[in-house]
Amino acid sequence: MRFLVAGGCGFIGSNLVKRLLLDGHEVFVVDDLSRGSLEKLDDYVHHKNLKFFKLDATGQEVLEIPAKFDVVVDLVAYKIPRYSSGLKTLFVNSRSAENLLKIATRDSAKFVMASTSDVYGKSTTFPYTEDGDLLIGPSTSRRWAYAVSKIFNEHMTIAYHDEYGTRYVILRFFGTYGPHQYLDWWGGPVGVFLKNIHEGLPLTIHGDGEQKRTFMYIDDLVEGILRAAESPSADNEIINLGTSEEISILDLARLIHKLSYPEKELKLEFVPYESFTQNYEDPKRRLGDFSKMKKILNFDPRFSLEEGLLRFIDWFKKRQR
Ligand SMILES: NC(=O)c1ccc[n+]([C@@H]2O[C@H](COP(=O)([O-])OP(=O)(O)OC[C@H]3O[C@@H](n4cnc5c(N)ncnc54)[C@H](O)[C@@H]3O)[C@@H](O)[C@H]2O)c1
């Protein structure tokens, strides 16, 4: 099949692109390289079935790529506005999704939308089911702009289906980690914790660190995305993609330390939420229901957190040599 992967030089995108090429697909990658890099594609950057376009997916040029696609994957993102601006988060995420939906509609392709567990917001109805309520905090708390942009994109995707018959699958990713993850907060706690342990720097723990999260190893996430893209039974569905193995942020820090460089001192720096700007809110827990993923995609994650972390740490250590 011919895939268009927008945001294909980012963390998830680069891992997905490599797997698609290994599986014999033709892949067109669009990325403006604002965050991602060609280096993340390793040697696959020269693969005969890969075509790369350095383009801003919010602009018109992406609509002019002379090809017809079977699957359009939208992995473009500006994340939590703590790292940039609310305007950019809302604008980049929604405009790029709109362009990519136009392409999928034009080509009768399947649209794969990367949504996030963040859309469940502050809901305390655990585990989160795909048809459950989405409970977002006040608009004065800028961090919700990311979730709102993704909820908007979910509605826009479903509206395209209603109006034009566009086939889609909406995937709500829970936390993920693995090779080529960013080693700063843009990529989440796993990468930044490992990097700081290695460099002897303190690990920043937001609040008391008792907030719980789940983390899926990137190879499992990619497998889930592929199954969702290829399986007709996933058409026009919203599916949570993640694991049920919960861990507190504090225990995550301790586990990464134990598995990576136990000989180094573990330095923790607690940062109270009150010191955050923009009225920041951090859900205490975020547990998904993955029965739809298991049933529709016939898929269970292969890697436990410890197994996945060991693989990630191995990749990280090889890069230090
Ligand atoms: N990583 C996670 O744990 C996680 C969790 C939930 C949802 N998601 C979603 O999955 C998707 C991929 O996430 P990721 O972690 O790989 O992010 P990432 O930042 O690594 O990748 C995003 C890519 O989009 C590119 N990009 C940004 N603006 C662009 C534009 N205007 N035009 C073209 N390219 C542009 C960046 O250069 C980058 O390569 C995103 O939609 C994200 O919201 C990720």
Image (spheres, helix red, strand yellow):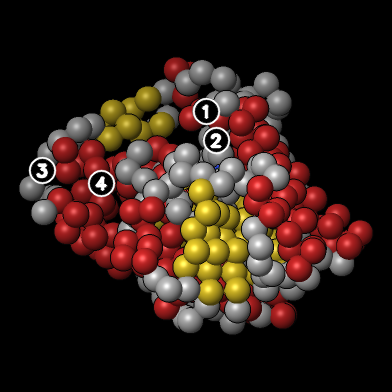
* Circle nearer the viewer, 4 or 3: 4
The CA span between labels 1 and 3 is: 33 Å
Q: Quadrant of residue 225 in the image?
A: bottom right
Left or right for 16, reference 121? left
* Discs 4, 3 touching: Cβ within 8 Å: no
Left or right for 195, reference 13? left
The CA span between labels 4 and 3 is: 12 Å
Q: Is mark 1 within 8 Å of ligand 1?
A: no
In the rendered image, residue 60, in percent from the top left (x then y), is placed at 70, 45
Name the residue that disc number 4 marks.
194
**Which residue is nearer to you in this view: 147 or 163?**
163
**Residue at coordinates 60% horizontally, 64% vertically from top-left?**
4
Residue furthest left in the image: 263
Name the residue that disc number 3 marks.
264
Three-letter amino acid code of the residue under disc 1: Ser
Helix, strand, or loop for circle 1?
loop
Q: Is residue 22 above or below residue 112?
A: below
Q: Is mark 3 within 8 Å of ligand 1?
A: no
* Circle nearer the viewer, 1 or 4: 1
Which mark is on residue 84?
A: 1
Local packing at callout 3 (Cα closer than 10 Å; few below 14, some 14-19, many 20+) is few
